[in-house]
Image (cartoon, rainbow, N blue to C red):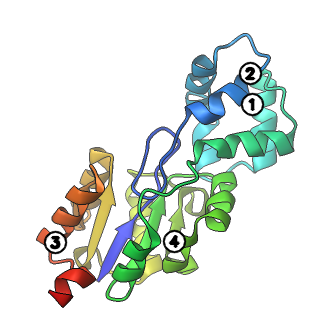
Amino acid sequence: RCLSDWSSDVCSSDLLIRLNISRAQAGLARGLALSPEELWSAIERDPRWQDWQEGRMSPQDWHINLCSRFGVLLNFEDFTTVWNEVLEPQPIHASPVFEDLSKRYKLGLLSNTDPIHVARMESNYDFFRYFPPPNRTYSCAVGATKPSPMIFKAALRACKSRAEESVYIDDIPAYADAARNLGFQAVVFHNAEKLRHDLAALGVQFQDQLSA
């Protein structure tokens, strides 16, 4: 059985790593006429945003695009540092949670994200060791973003699992609905305590339950 888990796009928090957009906004907007909030809103509406999220632009080209369109003044190295500031250093769940689940279930990641964030996440968060590299499905690697069926099907192929055997967890209801429409059991994440309750209702077992 597969627990399909994920790290969300850069406009919301997720159930692995909390995203804090304000941490990056000020650095990106430094020296510009746009406020940090105005700049971020414009970036999300940029016509190349989906190309960036779906891997059709390199990090260098994305940086050039933002510099040319909005006047971002950072060199590429500083831009990468600031771009990664959206990722809170402390993960939402402690690693023992994933260690526990990985003993009985296949864990997979499904994420709308970009290559700069992928490199940062994989090198800085130790819980990634419980998600084998083949089971990590990133929008920038497969060329599709949630809620496209393409990325969910790519995740199933990566995990060598069937939808009806998999549990998908997301904090965005529309993405959970998209997974459910493909046959997944889907859970909308609200907080860690409720997630544990919702998973238990689906028959997912934790070590303390097995020992009781």
Is any atom of residue 187 visible in this view?
no
**Which mark is in front, 2 or 3?**
3
Q: Do the numbered discs 2 and 1 sit on residues whose CB atoms are within 8 Å?
A: yes
Q: Is residue 107 above or below residue 48?
A: below
Which residue carries the number 1 mark?
66
Give me the residue at 57% from left, 31% from top. 22
Q: Earlier in the sequence, mark 1 or mark 4?
A: 1
From this viewpoint, which residue is outermost toward the right? 75
Which residue carries the number 3 mark?
200
Mark 1 secondary-structure assignment = helix
Q: CA distance from mark 3 to mark 1?
A: 45 Å
Q: Do the numbered discs 2 and 3 sit on residues whose CB atoms are within 8 Å?
A: no
Q: Earlier in the sequence, mark 3 or mark 4?
A: 4
Q: CA distance from mark 2 to mark 1?
A: 6 Å
Which residue carries the number 4 mark?
127
From this viewpoint, which residue is outermost toward the top? 33
Give me the residue at 67% from left, 58% from top. 120
Q: Amino acid at mark 1?
A: Leu
Q: Amino acid at mark 3?
A: Ala
Q: Do the numbered discs 3 and 4 sit on residues whose CB atoms are within 8 Å?
A: no
Q: Earlier in the sequence, mark 3 or mark 1?
A: 1
Q: Position of residue 105 (x, y in %)?
A: 33, 84
Q: Position of residue 152 (x, y in %)?
A: 39, 64
Q: Earlier in the sequence, mark 2 or mark 4?
A: 2
